[in-house]
Image: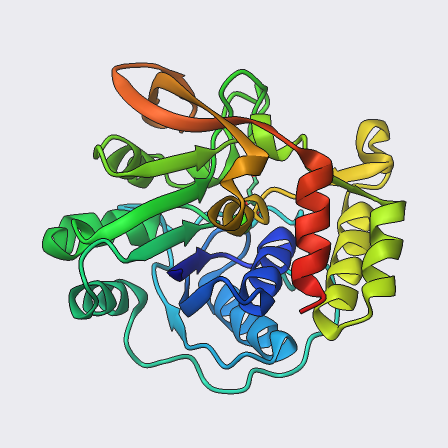
Amino acid sequence: MPAIIDTDPGIDDAIAILHALRVPDLDILALTTVAGNIGLSVTTGNAGRIVACAGVPTPVHAGAAAPLGREPRPETGVHGTDGLGGVTFPAPLAEPASRDAVAYMAEALMAAEPKTIDLLCLAPLTNVALLLRHHPEAAARIRRIIAMGGAVDEPGNMGADKRAEFNLAHDPEAAAEVLHAGLDLVLIPLDATRQFRANADFIARLRTVGTAPSVACADLIEAYFAQTEGQTQIRESRPLHDPCVPLYALRPDLFRLETRSLQVEPESGALVPGPYQMQVAMGVDADGLRDALAEGLAC
Ligand code: BDR
Ligand code: CA
């Protein structure tokens, strides 16, 4: 299954990427980076370090440094000042590629048979919106987009009123352009990702697996706990948002999809009732997902 991962690493992005690079059934052609959890130069450097940890040489293409038509947004700090919760990673195997992310996506899509490449989106949708705007013929050749983002029935995780979710709220204009475009798209919102949690037992299991990527994931989840210390509900477990995306590509049977009629609210990025039919993951088999993640990281 050839796929491009669009990402802003990001603790949970790193776990998703390590798994996706190691698991034999996914062929990750490249990582494309975007500003989100932290600024673009950091997300791009982190992508290179994650590739080095996985030991699977994969090009990294840097994309948008700011949401559409806006200044770069302040960083959230949830992922630490280095975006990876202070976990040590090896130096990148190579410099980022010279071609920018959106041009790379367009070229890769045009060079491949139509409808053969998936986009696995772990971040604000700025790069994907730019692809739709500037390379519509290439975008029409995407096989499928699987994107982590949004909150449907659940509260979000942004702003005082918690209506919106980070990936959509960071660039609401891009989110609307992508989610309203009628593409073959599966959205994995907080409603599903909050059901897929890691606790101390799961961290211990990843340490027992013992590969460099699985130990790095154990360290990353521990760092995730440290970033949110003191919040009672999450002291015992943390949700694994972005790993749901490659896991959906591999194991759609572990997710329950619903078709919902929604739209992205301008400015806030909240998902609200609207005219666009979307395939949304609303339930997961959490034990099955934990098994699949641990098994993939053992490869
Ligand atoms: C999303 O926001 C980011 O902080 C995570 O990496 C994930 O992509 C969860 O709302
Ligand atoms: Ca992310």
Res. 268 visible in picture:
no
Q: Above or below — where is 282 with respect to 96? A: above
Residue 242 coordinates in the image, percent (x, y): 56, 47
> Residue 233 sits in which quadrant?
top right
Q: Position of residue 261 (x, y in %)?
A: 33, 16
In the picture shown, does residue 96 fall above or below 140? below
Q: Tell whether 60 sits left or right of 215.
A: left
Q: Locate the N terminus and report the quarter of the image it occupies.
A: bottom left
Between residues 98 and 144, which one lies in front from this camera angle? Answer: 144
x and y percentages locating residue 172 in the rendered image: 35, 34
Q: How is the image coloured?
A: rainbow
- Residue at 42 percent of width and 46 percent of height: 124
Count of numbered tags: 0
- For the point 81% across and 59% down, which residue is it? 206
Which x, y percent locates residue 140? 16, 49
- Image check: 251 left or right of 6? right
Residue 266: tell me if it is visible.
Answer: yes
Would residue 88 appear left or right of 160 to someone viewing this image? Answer: right
Q: Is residue 209 left or right of residue 100?
A: right
* Depth check, front residue: 133 or 67: 133
Q: Residue furthest left?
A: 137
Give me the residue at 29% from left, 70% from top. Answer: 100
The residue lying toward the viewer, choosing from 116 and 134, is 116
Residue lying at the far bottom of the rendered structure: 94
Tell me what residue is drawn at x 29 percent, y 21 percent.
277
Q: Is residue 137 above or below residue 273?
A: below
Which image quarter is the C terminus in? bottom right
